[in-house]
Image (tube, grey):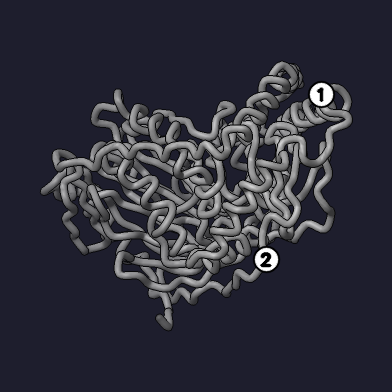
Amino acid sequence: MHLRVIAGAAFLTVVCACGPTMPPTSAPKPADPTFDPFRTVLQQYIDQTQPYRKQAAQAQESTPGKATPTTAAAIAVRTRQNDLGDALRTKLRPNARQGELFTPNITDAFRHQIAAAFDSPKRDLLLDDMAEQLTTPAPTQTARINQRLEAPRIPPRLMELLPPLPKQLEYDFTDRTLVLRDVDADVVVDYLPDAFPVKATASVPTVPPQPIVGGATSPLPMPQLRGGTVFALIGDSGSGDQPQEAVAQAMLNYFNTARRFSFVLMLGDNLYHDDYENEFLVPYKALLDRGVKFYAAIGNHDRDLEIHFKPFNMSDKDRYSFDEGNARFVALNSNHPGDPDQIKWLDGVFSDAGDKWRICFFHHPLYSSGQHASESRDVIRPAFEPALVRNHVDVVFGGHEHLYERVRPQEGGIRYFVSGGGGRSLYDYRKSPFDEIGVSEHHFMVAEIAGDRLFFEAISQQQKVIDCGVLYRRAGAKPDNDTTKWLSQCEASRPRIVTTQ
């Protein structure tokens, strides 16, 4: 399979994505026997709580309006969360104390592992990654067993150094404390004080939008093509503030005046403050009322509990797939890039996709030129790229960087887009050799798949076209009359992006 991009009048042939020798499936890293007692304790906890998880799920299912894009769906998730939390507090672990899961011998192993990481060349990178997690207001309370705690999750770079957890649990941190959280109940089940030798401090800079000069001031409609599948994309959107509202309004205007899209891919960081209403239901109410579906991927600032929120269409899973038109869409959880079960699942999810477009979407990008460039290069890319290549994925959409970026074809001819400008404060864009275009601007994307063509455009909150073009899957493909006409409109709409880079 070949992939070609045509942006305006520029033609770029991309290396064939089928036929070459594929990288071998990576063998999972063997489990460290030092943490075998920890795994045993965790499994006992999961076995003990499983019946109550089922009861909590049933409580959600019995909530009226659980699947509607309204407050009732948020109430249903909270019902599930509170039902399990109450069971932990009153029935399962009413007298639980710190150290029941982080036992003394396990504590020593964790401290040694973390100390070694922070005494390595990775120290500054680890602190940078943890600092980025603190862009939301830092928690003021201390960890308490069976209580909620506003604390960020451990970033992927540090996650790969710690023993993996069951899906029902996650690592968080507050100050220098390592926290073990129950995902479904959203409460602390244990914590390890002074686990980190130093405290991370929030330090991610934000920048104003880059000036965009000229270009069209009205939306560029997608072409009206027979059998086309039109969808939108937003990333890092759940801020609940003015930029999110502006992007949501721009999406609605496009929907009403340019071209309707049937669904939206959410590229993670959907709810920065765990607020289903003000960070999702309110901003996108007009689109939800018109029947537009949203498909979410989990971001680093999201709670995994979001998988149970019916309007996100995740079906209680952090990785899933669905077909629309001539495409298979696959959502992954990039908070766990090294999860061998996820890679194994990815190796099978396209087995019956035939000649459909193969599109993956998840939060952390493999290639980026923003704040997280080193994380993309050192952690996300090595974990995901071999599997994406051997499964002949055509296009990957990610967020995490609060900017827009289109990357040149990479290994296997895969095209990568970074679209993290859905509402959160912007990051600085630093051009990389692998970039075709990039800009710090709040925006959303629209795409249309028709046969072997994928039309795309990025649109600012002021409804200006930031970028547009067409991807082809076949070598030697040439634009037909409809495509040529649209590309002419695309080129006429293209602005000049002012940069000092």
Q: Amino acid at mark 1?
A: Leu
> Horizontal placement of 398 versus 318: left or right?
left
- Residue 384 location, x and y as percent? 38, 45
| Res. 331 visible in picture | no
Graded by Cα atoms within 10 Å as few (under 14), some (14 to 19) or many (20 or more), the crowding at tag 1 reads some
* Secondary structure found at label 2: loop
- Identify which residue is drawn at 46% across, 71% down: 429
Q: Secondary structure at mark 1?
A: helix
Q: Which mark is residue 92?
A: 1
The amino acid on which the numbered mark 2 sits, given as a three-letter code, is Val
Q: Can residue 136 be seen from the camera position used here?
A: yes
Residue shown at 66% from the left, 48% from the top: 108
The correct choice, above or below, for 157 with respect to 199 in the image is above
Identify the residue under disc 2: 198
- The numbered mark, 1 or 2, whose residue comes first in the sequence reads 1
Q: Residue furthest left?
A: 476
Q: CA distance from mark 1 to mark 2?
A: 34 Å
x and y percent of residue 324 in the render? Answer: 39, 30
Q: Quadrant of residue 92?
A: top right
Q: Is residue 50 above or below residue 487?
A: above
Q: Foreground: 96 or 345?
A: 96
* Foreground of the two, 99 or 142: 99
Q: Position of residue 258 (x, y in %)?
A: 45, 49
Q: Is residue 378 left or right of residue 335?
A: left
Is residue 390 or residue 488 the one in the foreground? 390
Say if 377 sits above or below 340 in the image: below
- For the residue carrying disc 2, how many other residues have a C-alpha within 10 Å: few (<14), some (14-19), or many (20+)? few
Image label count: 2
The N terminus sits in image quarter: top left
- Which dot, 1 or 2, sits closer to the camera? 2
Residue 139 point in image, percent of width and height: 78, 57
Quadrant for residue 205, please give it: bottom right
